[in-house]
């Protein structure tokens, strides 16, 4: 019984450590490949030619973009054009797009 009392806490500690899987950082090259769809509204490299309708997103901080895209994807933020675009993005897609746009120069 003494060994079992030591084993159970160790098992749960290992289980908890395994549950905190580390997310892969955003990859701006993969983000650039996914950004082709975004360019239709937000412009090449995130520099919108019609900023009154579509905001420029070049140079946007990655954390801010990740939060916005997740909010659109998860239905916490509603926009008839953005929500459908974000619906199928994975967390990794979002990190990649955020890394790409953060690296772009706002013009």
Image (cartoon, rainbow, N blue to C red):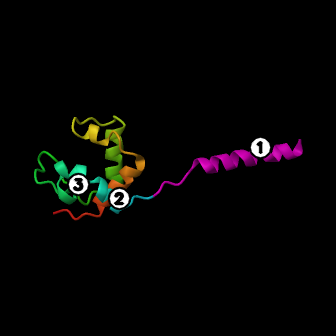
Q: Is residue 46 above or below residue 75?
A: below
| Label 3 vs 1, first from the N-terminus | 1
> Which image quadrant for residue 49?
bottom left
Instruction: Tell me which residue sits at (29%, 64%) in the image.
Output: 103
Which residue position holds label 3? 57
Which residue position holds label 1? 8
State how far apart marks 2 and 3 are (Cα). Answer: 17 Å
Which residue position holds label 2? 30
Q: Is residue 61 visible?
A: no
Q: Is residue 99 above or below residue 40?
A: below
**1 vs 2, front mark:** 2
Residue 39 in percent (x, y) is at 20, 53
Judge left or right: residue 42 versus residue 78: left
State how far apart marks 1 and 2 are (Cα). Answer: 42 Å
Instruction: Tell me which residue sits at (74%, 49%) in the image.
Output: 10
Q: Nearer the viewer, residue 106 or 43?
A: 43
Q: Which numbered disc covers residue 94?
A: none
Instruction: Tell me which residue sits at (38%, 54%) in the image.
Output: 95
What main secondary structure does the magenta stretch of the protein show? helix
Instruction: Tell me which residue sits at (24%, 53%) in the image.
Output: 36
| Label 2 vs 3, first from the N-terminus | 2
Reply yes or no: does residue 16 show up in magenta: yes
Reply yes or no: does residue 93 show up in magenta: no
Q: Nearer the viewer, residue 37 or 107?
A: 37
Q: Are marks 2 and 3 in contact (CB under 8 Å)?
A: no
Circle count? 3
Residue 107 in percent (x, y) is at 15, 63
């Amino acid at each position: 019984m003494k060994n079992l009392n030591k084993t159970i806490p160790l098992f749960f500690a290992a289980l908890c450590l395994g549950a905190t899987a580390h997310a892969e950082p955003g990859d701006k090259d993969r983000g650039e490949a996914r950004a082709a769809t975004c360019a239709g509204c937000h412009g090449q490299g995130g520099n919108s030619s019609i900023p009154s309708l579509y905001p420029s997103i070049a140079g946007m901080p990655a954390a801010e973009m990740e939060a916005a895209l997740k909010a659109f994807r998860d239905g916490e933020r509603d926009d008839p054009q953005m929500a459908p675009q974000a619906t199928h993005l994975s967390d990794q897609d979002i990190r990649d797009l955020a890394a790409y746009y953060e690296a772009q120069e706002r013009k």
